[in-house]
Image (tube, rainbow, N blue to C red):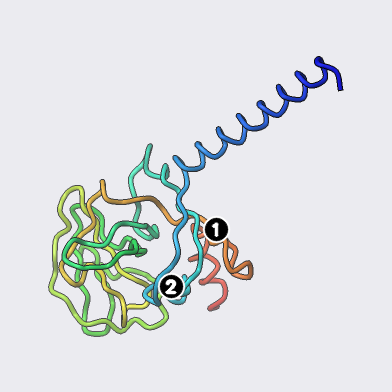
């Protein structure tokens, strides 16, 4: 191999490494990897399911009711892993859970096709502070969520759960899941 060929090979190799580093850097800034820990989001998400989290989802818009978000556990709880919950109440909303488990937002019942077991202990009406969100797990029987007295600050949201990547049989985009669950129930 002559010097010109070696130089060309090294330049090509450097280009490949540079592109790989750029792709890796962009993915670290835009995406996060999260593992579901527990059954609080059943049936939507299963224990040990792997998710890609879109860390830029709220760069140009605000979180919406129904979004599944990832956030660090509230300070009063000694959990190592991030929490994964669904946004129920938006800033300024009133949220109340009735005896039968029906959630009321601003005195109107919330349609929740993703909840299979609606049982939940009733809660008094609370008002979601500005810049905060009221979150609940889909499996209300076992979920440690805003019914226990905490809200999630906007700045604490790591990102929006975007794609289930593992196990492969559970691969799907999470934003279309509620529609799929409605279609399966009918």
At a point 44% along the width and 59% down the height, the residue shown is 34
Residue 90 position within the rendered picture, expressed as x and y whole percent measured from the top left = 25, 55
Dot 1 corresponds to which residue? 173
Q: Check contact, mark 2 vs mark 1: CB within 8 A.
A: no
Q: CA distance from mark 2 to mark 1?
A: 17 Å
- Is residue 95 shown above or below 58? below
User: Which residue occupies the foreground of this view, 127 or 13?
Assistant: 13
Q: Quadrant of the N terminus?
A: top right
Disc 1 crowd rating (10 Å Cα; few below 14, some 14-19, many 20+) is some
Q: Is residue 52 left or right of residue 6?
A: left
Residue 94 position within the rendered picture, expressed as x and y whole percent measured from the top left = 18, 62
At a point 38% along the width and 83% down the height, the residue shown is 117
User: Mark 2: which secondary structure?
Assistant: loop
- Is residue 25 shown above or below 1? below
| Nearer to us: label 2 or label 1 | 1
- Is residue 98 shown above or below 23? below
Residue 172 position within the rendered picture, expressed as x and y whole percent measured from the top left = 58, 62
At a point 21% along the width and 53% down the height, the residue shown is 132
Dot 2 corresponds to which residue? 113
Q: In the displayed orientation, state which residue is furthest to the right.
A: 1
The numbered mark at residue 85 is none
Q: Is residue 46 left or right of residue 16?
A: left
């Amino acid at each position: 191999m002559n010097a010109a060929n070696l130089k060309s090979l090294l330049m090509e190799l450097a280009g490949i490494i540079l592109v790989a580093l750029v792709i890796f850097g962009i993915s670290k800034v835009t995406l996060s990897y999260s593992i579901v820990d527990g059954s609080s989001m059943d049936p939507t998400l299963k224990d040990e399911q792997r998710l890609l989290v879109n860390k830029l989802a709220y760069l140009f818009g605000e979180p919406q009711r129904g979004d599944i978000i990832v956030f660090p556990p509230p300070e009063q709880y000694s959990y190592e892993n991030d929490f994964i919950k669904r946004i129920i109440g938006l800033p300024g909303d009133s949220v109340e859970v009735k005896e039968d488990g029906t959630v009321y937002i601003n005195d109107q019942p919330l349609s929740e096709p993703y909840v299979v077991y609606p049982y939940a202990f009733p809660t008094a009406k609370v008002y979601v502070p500005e810049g905060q969100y009221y979150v609940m797990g889909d499996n209300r029987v076992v979920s440690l969520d805003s019914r226990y007295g905490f809200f999630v600050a906007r700045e604490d949201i790591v990102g929006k759960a975007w794609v289930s990547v593992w196990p492969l049989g559970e691969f799907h985009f999470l934003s279309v899941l509620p529609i799929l669950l409605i279609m399966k129930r009918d």
